[in-house]
Amino acid sequence: MSDRTPGAAGDEVAAAPEPPAPEMVPTPAAVAAQCDTAAAAQRDAAADDPDGAVVWHREDLRIRDQPAVAAAAESADVVVPLFVFDPGFYGDDGLACDARIRFLHECLFDLDDRYDTASAGRAGLTYAHGDPLAVLSAFVDAGWDVVAGRTPTGRYGLERDEAAADLGVRFVDGDGLVRDAERTRRNWSDRLEAHLTDDTVEPALDDTVLAAASTGVTVDGVEATYDTTPTKSKVPEGGTTVAREKLASFVARIGDYPGNISSPLDARDGCSGLSPYIRFGCLSVRQVYRYVREHAPDCRGRDMFESRLFWNRHYNQKLEDWPGWLDTAVNPELEGFNADEYDPELVAAWKDGRTGYPMVDAAMRCLRETGWLNFRMRAMGASAFSHLLQQPWRIGADWYHHHLVDSDAAINYTQWQSQAGLVGKPGVRLYNPRKQVRDQDPDGEWIREWVPELEGLPAEHLPQPERTPQPVQEECGVAVGGPDADYPLPVVEYEAAKERFWRRYEPRQAAAAARLGDEEIARRASLSGGVPRAKTIAQEYGDDDPDTQTDLTAF
């Protein structure tokens, strides 16, 4: 892997240029003519007017098992791999935190090295900056075909991709999701398993000239323009090279996986650590699945991890089926739930880790400082926000999406809606943050790492610091509550908040379940059992039966 470091001291960096004008983009023939003699055979075979294709890399930042790379290599004589820096992801109002941007840039350095190797040193990635549509239009006008992999996206991305298709961009499938089918969930698991067990796609690069177009855009220039120096700690290095190392390391200890996923203390080193690499496409889900199948022992850990890969595709299928997951309640009956409860002080307390619930506060501080949480802590934080503080789900979902280095919009927003109870199916999971202390951090090691003001508090008082007797507080030097307190009282009382949530939510459950009987709503919910499952829920729970409430506080 390259030893280049983004923004290293002494580098000459320039501000990111505007999108290239059409006359600035060379034609395929001009690019082919610039290739050195090592590519002479391929270039001569391409005749005087070679076909050129641009691979528009977006999330699939790899070469192998990358359908767009394979399609471009098959159809064109000259291929230029391209990445476009979208200004919408940068700056103070950007969609991603600095650590995720740095991870992305490391992935790009690694991909650039891989193209450099594949082209025998002739070409790496071509970079551009600005509105992707303007950039792609310039390449199309210069005579290039543009190929990209199809990925699930929200409304903005869908509009962008539709506009790109109008320009002539060709989107190709290859991620295992079902598209253009009347019922996408019909035999879905069988289809996905067939995809995952099928051979990976290997591009025929030996017969292709890999080339680059000079645009003046560099990663260093982009970092200098937006000052993206990350402040988070414990962030992994990006790129396929590191991803492969992590995959091999995880498979060697996969037998321990089931016991390491729930506790935040164990999960950081005990889980695979592959989520950001899958999110950015450094490895495909199929590559990971096949490697695990071929190298891991037959054990519960392997089965459990493989099921997680299926769940990854399950939630991506949801967004593919309905892009509204990112901004609209999937069940219209629950649209706007908690909107009239909005309280900026409660939102700030949650974001800052000052709710008075140590497990929640540790999770929120860990998220802000490292860009990572294990799944149980993510779910608990979302439950606290939606059920106890009763705040509008989008605010919390956007906060997670900004800070999580591995945030996949398809997973983040669908999980938030499910956790907030906006799907309308029975079984809302309300996490008890006090019980989570006892179950997942009984000695308080993780809490004390992230909430150091509770360092001296005995472990038995960490589930409810506000109940700590005054003499104990004085003896251990931790004051809870009051104007000079080290740690605040709970911003809401747990039992009262829980009961209030159910009083507000329960009257809407039956009507919400009934809406799942509507074909359109059933399709957008995209349950694992498809439309039939949604309609079954509507039949069984879509009435005024008070027993439809399901309080899962035991979790």
Image: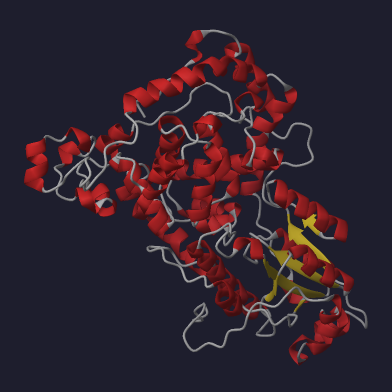
Q: Nearer the viewer, residue 56 or 166?
A: 166
Q: Residue at x 46, y 42 (%)?
A: 344
Q: In the picture, residue 96 is in which quadrant?
A: bottom right
In this view, which residue lies farthest toward the bottom? 37
Q: Nearer the viewer, residue 387 or 115?
A: 387
Q: In the picture, residue 329 is in which quadrant?
A: top right
Q: Residue at x 48, y 82 (%)?
A: 8
Q: Position of residue 190 (x, y in %)?
A: 65, 36
Residue 391 appears in view = yes
Instruction: Name the quarter where the C terminus is drawn.
Output: top left
Q: Position of residue 131 (x, y in %)?
A: 74, 65
Q: Residue at x 60, y 45 (%)?
A: 410
Q: Position of residue 421 (x, y in %)?
A: 53, 28
The correct choice, above or below, for 383 with respect to 538 in the image is: below
**Left or right of residue 539, residue 501 in this image:** left
Q: In the picture, residue 70 is in which quadrant?
A: bottom right
The correct choice, above or below, for 374 with respect to 535 in the image is: below
Q: Nearer the viewer, residue 354 or 7?
A: 354
Residue 404 appears in view = no
Q: Residue at x 71, y 30 (%)?
A: 523
**Left or right of residue 24, residue 241 in this image:** left
Q: Position of residue 458 (x, y in %)?
A: 14, 42
In this view, which residue lies farthest toward the front? 483
